[in-house]
Amino acid sequence: MKKFTALVAAGIVASATAALAGPEIVDGPGVDPTCFAPWSEDTKFFQWEGREGPFKIAVVNGFVGNTWRIQMVKTAKAFAEDPAIADKISEFRVVSTGTDAPAQLGAIEDFINQGFDAIVTIAVSPEGFDRVIRLADRNDVVLVPFDNVLDTDAVMQVNEDQLTMGRMWAEFTLNELAAKGVTSGKILEVRGLPGNSVDRDRSIGINEVLEASDGDWEIVSVVGNWDDGTTQKVVADAIAVHGEFVAIVGQGGSNGVIQALMDAGHPWVPVAGESENGFRKAIAEYSDEGLKGISIGQSPGLVAIAMKAAISALEGNVMPQLISVPLPVATYEELEDGLNYWSDLPDNFFTVNEFPPCGVNISGPAIMSQSETDN
Amino acid sequence: MIERFKYSLRQNRGFYGALLGLIVLYLLYNSLHPRGFSTAVLIQNANEAVVLAFVAVAQTIPVLIGGLDLSVGAVMTLASCIASVLVTGSPAEMTLGIILSVLAGTMFGLLNGLVVVYGRIQPIIATLATGAIAIGLALFVRPQPGGDIDGDLNWAITNAVFDFAETYGFADDGNAAWLQPIAWIPVPLIILTAVMLLVWVPYRRSVTGRTAYAIGSAEGAAYMSGLPIARAKIMAFTLAGFFAGCAGLYLAIQTSSGNADVVQAGEYTLKSIAAVVIGGTSLLGGVGTAVGSIFGAFIIRIIEFFFRINIGSFSIDPLLQTLFQGVVLLVAVSLGSLRLTRIKNRLDVFR
């Protein structure tokens, strides 16, 4: 009887510790720092108890309906079949819930209940995931938000440094202007979706560099929502009102910037922008005529890094809580057809997908050929 | 008794069809789920469905009088943003916050009713405008997503009765013998049932409630019969605001935050209309019930559930899921029109 009581007690203790499971906070450095770079020196490190693969992994997307998201879904599917990780995944599922917080929370919870090992997600809101984080920890599920990350340090997350991206755009633009000998004039800033942290951080980065420079710049800001059509319209309006700009720094919708410049017959000037294929095509074609461009992008390939990070965490490696993915930068000097842009692919395709330090080598054509018929 | 049931069956074909569909789909989902028929899955499903269920109930009442309320999603968003600010602090403060959030929704519904009745504007246009106002207010209250709703409240409300008792330390931390028969029931379902019993059922039986049905069937006749038309219309929109407020409050507690998400508000409004139709309520007004709309909301959710489970070789590409969902919804809604194929005289359609 005593033995039985002891057994029950042991069982209760075991279940209690299981209930409090989740990552342990440990000291760095983490595994493979060239791929999983910690965000800053203050970033915590997590470690889950290692387990045997292969793993069941789910991607819970929110909004679907723009090129970026569609390409992200295709990248996820292509990467799951990549020989490097294919045999570590036993089951792989992708769902899109739309911009509906309860539906996304429900989908994540469903995969936790189904016994999935890791769930990769683009959060529809930076808040509101307390319950699923708690459940994921209880069930020892690794939850990895990326791109639109959560305002919490309780989960492992993957993103690019938006502030640095903004600074690099502005620095490149100032260098090109200096090379041309321009020291004053109007610079057009094209912003993204208002109220979004990515838009905020990129704009802060751009403006702090421009303000710190010696040049006499007048900065004109317009809102383009990261969308080609909207951007084309607002840039065209800005050109109509202000005449000529010495440079344009855009956060997104870069195809729209190029189109507006062409339509208005505006002379080619240095342009900083995202990583749309059409933008890179234009830079390659017109850089001799003055379109000195830099293209940095938020890559849909982030999903692959998030998946890789999830697997690495499941294998028991020490992981940074916030992983900073290196910015994929290409200037007009580095563009090469078939390598970092594709003249035979559509304009709205996002060119940056590969992250060689992470072994993520899915090229544009490989994604575009990904079939849409099986899951 | 059997005669009465037969009569009810004939009168509420849509409702019983929805109920049957719900049962079949839910049993199928659970039998395919690795942890089907467990409390965890039931809780998860209840949490996901209850906000939409409340919004669907909110939509039902204006539909019954032959209108549409395009502001339900926006009012829900407004209430959730208000709740994310107010439902915090001491238990008394939280209670006050809960009451004020639902009251805000109710007041907004009252405003809708006044605009429709005394402004003499079509409900669909009036609520399109007031919905934009509601979203504007929500953005004003909460320009950035966030909020500080009590974590214990979030955990207790979004779980089973057992966890509720455990969180607040009553009934022997949920282990009391008398609690066991109901310990597995998800709290959201209890809340939904309680609100329906306390608000919908008395309303349905009141003169005002029956007047709403009469307006939907034949407004002229209702007016000639001396029914309180203006009062019933105002009440219909006020109640819609109340239920949308309940939805917003639950959404805020569920996500421990508020987010003035315009797209989400629109999605909920549209899904609420779909839920109402699937639940057997006629968009022409006069026929239907809010309980059917709840089933309709559940059915919409269950269709989404199937994307997540392994159905063998049959699985739907993530990029085609929305399309598939639309086709299934279309089929579900069309089932309601099947009777058209059986009628002898075309005029019967208008009966």
Image (cartoon, rainbow, N blue to C red):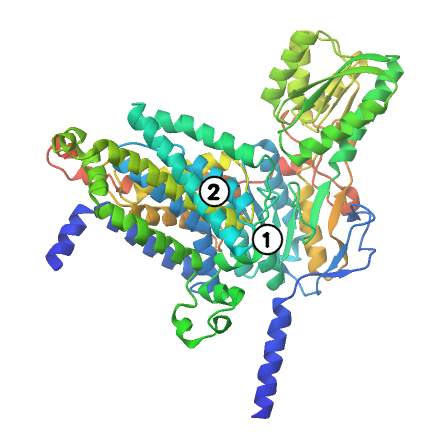
Height in image: A66 above or below B154?
above
Label 2: how many Cα within 10 Å (few below 14, some 14–19, many 20+): some
Residue A88, percent across and down?
A: 66, 57
x 46%, y 43%: residue: B101
Secondary element at image label 1: helix
- Amino acid on which disc 1 is placed: Asp
Outermost residue toward the front? B92
Outermost residue toward the bottom? A1
| Residue that numbered label 1 is attached to | A130
| Residue that numbered label 2 is attached to | B321
Q: Nearer the viewer, residue B110 or B286?
A: B110
Give the chain of mark 1.
A
Residue A246, percent across and down?
A: 78, 13
Side (left or right) of B335 relative to A127: left
Tell me where residue B116 sits by quadrant: top left
Give the chain of mark 2.
B
